[in-house]
Image (cartoon, grey):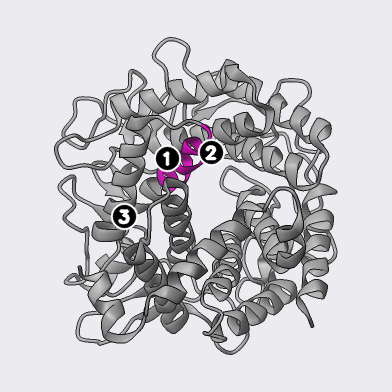
Amino acid sequence: MNQKELATEFTDALRDGILERWYPLVLDKELGGYFTNVTYDWRLPREQEKMIVTQARHVWVLSKLAEFVNAQNEYDRMAMHGYYFLRNHMWDAEYGGFYQIRSRAGGMSDMNGWRDEKRMYGNAFGIYALAALYRQTRDDEVLDFAQQAFRWVEEHSFDPKYNGYFQFLMRNGKAFDVNSEYKTIASDKNELGFKDQNGSIHLLEAYTELYRVWKSPLLRTQLEGLLVLIRDTIVTKEGYLGLFFQPDWTPVSFRNSNEEVRKNNFGLDHVSFGHDCETAFLMVEASHALGLENDVKTLAVAKKMLDHALRYGFDESVGGFYDGGYYLKGEGGCTIIKETKNWWAQAEGLNALLLFSKIFPQEKRYYDYFLKQWEYVKTYIIDSNNGDWFEGGVDKEPHFKTGPKSHIWKCTYHTSRALMNCIDLLNEKNTMTGAKKKEIVDLAHSWKTISSSSVLSGEQRHAEINA
C-alpha cells in the first residue's frame, strides 16, 4: 500500500471515528462544556462530572480540527462552547487556577476526592487549549486568559530551588505535600509530594503551544528549562522516562523492594513505553518551536527513547506497544510486566514512528514498524462496528469491546493528534506545495536536515547524549 492509500485510511479513521461520532454529540448544550461519559454505543449516561483535562482537550482538538478540515465556523463554534465553560466554571474566579473537577453544572464535586483542589497537570491542559484556540480564532480575550493561566502556574507551581513544578495545589494555589497541615482525600494521594514526568511533559507541550502565539521572554526561558529538565534529568541513561521524583529530583524507585511492594507501586515506578514515544515527539516539537539551532542532543535523546521503546516494549508478533516494563534487579534488560496495550500509547506510537521515519529516511525500520503498528490499530484498537477506538487492545483485553468510549481520561486528544499528523506526513508532497506548509511537515523536514548533517549513530550519538 502506498502512502496516498494509507492517507485515505487515516482520513477515513478520522472522519468515521471522530468527526461523525463525537461532535456535536458531546456538547452539553444545556449546562455548557462537554459530556464526559459516553458508552461503547454512544449513549450518554446520567453521571457527567467535568474534569479540566477532558474539557480542555476537547477545546484543543476542536481548535485544531477547525483548520485541518477547513470547517472553521462549525468547529470554532464548538471550541468556543467549551471555552465559556472553562472561563465561567473550571477557572477559580477568586483565587485563580483551574479546578481539577467540577459537577456537570460547574459546581463543587466530590468525585475522586478532588473537591476544590488543583493540579499542575490540569492547568497545563487549560493553557494548551487556550493557546490553540487563540491561534485559530485570534480572539484577544482568549490570549489574555492563556497568559493569566501561565502566570498562575509560574507563581504557584514552579520550584525556584530545585527547578520543575509541584503537582498538588490547594484552592488558594499553595503547594502541599505529606507534611502539610492540609490533608487530601484525593484518589491520586499516593503521588503526593513527588514531582512527575507526566505533568512535566504536558506542561512542555502546553508551553510549546503558547510560545507559538506569544513570544514572552519568561515563557521562552521556562519552556527551554522544561526541555532541558526532561531531556537531561527525567530521561534515564537507558533511554526511558523516570516517572516520579523527590522534590530534589532523586528518582522514586522500588527496584530493591520485594515483588509485592514493587507491584503495589507499579504506578510510581515502571517503564511507560507510550510516554516515551510521546515525549520523543514533544521534545523535538518544543526545540523546533524555540528555534534552537542544530539541537543534535535533543534529537539524539528523542531517537534513543523511541529505539528503546521498540527494542523492549513493542509486540513483535502482532504489533502494539505494551503498557509497562521494568528493569528488574539482577537482569540486564527491560522485562515486560504489564502486557496490556492502552489506546493512547498506540496513537502516540503511530505519530512518533511515522515522524521519525521522515527524519531518518535511511532507517527503513521506522516505517516498517509504523506499518505494523497501523495494522495492529486497525485490527485490535479501532471499533469497526461502533466507531472510534477501544480503550485497550482487544487482543489482550477483549472486555473493552463494550467498554466506554469516553470518560475523564479518554476523549479525542491522542487519537486526533496522531491521525491529523499522520495524514499530513503521508500527504507530504501535497502539503509542501500549498501556500502554508503544514506544521508537522515543516518540523520533519527541519529535523531531517539536522539528522543528515550529523552522524547520529554509534559513538558519536553516545557522545552527543552525554555531552
Amino acid type at mark 1: Tyr
Mark nearer the N terminus (3 vs 2) = 2
Assign a secondary structure to mark 1: helix
Tell me, yes or no, whether the highlighted magenta stretch contains residue 349. Answer: no
Q: Could you tell me what secondary structure mostly forms the magenta stretch?
A: helix
- Estimate the spatial distance between the alpha carbons at disc 3 and disc 1, rounded to whole Å: 15 Å
Q: Residue at x 43, y 65 (%)?
A: 276
Read off the residue under disc 2.
53
Read off the residue under disc 3.
230
Read off the residue under disc 1.
121
- Estimate the spatial distance between the alpha carbons at disc 2 and disc 1, rounded to whole Å: 8 Å
Assign a secondary structure to mark 2: helix
Q: Residues within 10 Å of mark 2 (few under 14, many from 20)?
A: many
Q: Nearer the viewer, residue 74 or 347?
A: 74
Q: Which residues are magenta?
A: 202-213
> Residue 417 location, x and y as percent?
63, 54
Mark nearer the N terminus (3 vs 1) = 1
Amino acid type at mark 3: Ile
Q: Quadrant of residue 88?
A: top right
**Number of numbered discs:** 3
Q: Nearer the viewer, residue 36 or 451?
A: 451
Location of residue 154 with respect to 67 vertically, above or below: above
Q: From the image, which quarter does the N terminus lie in?
A: bottom right
Location of residue 425 with respect to 65 vertically, above or below: below
* Viewer can see residue 105: no
Mark nearer the N terminus (2 vs 1) = 2
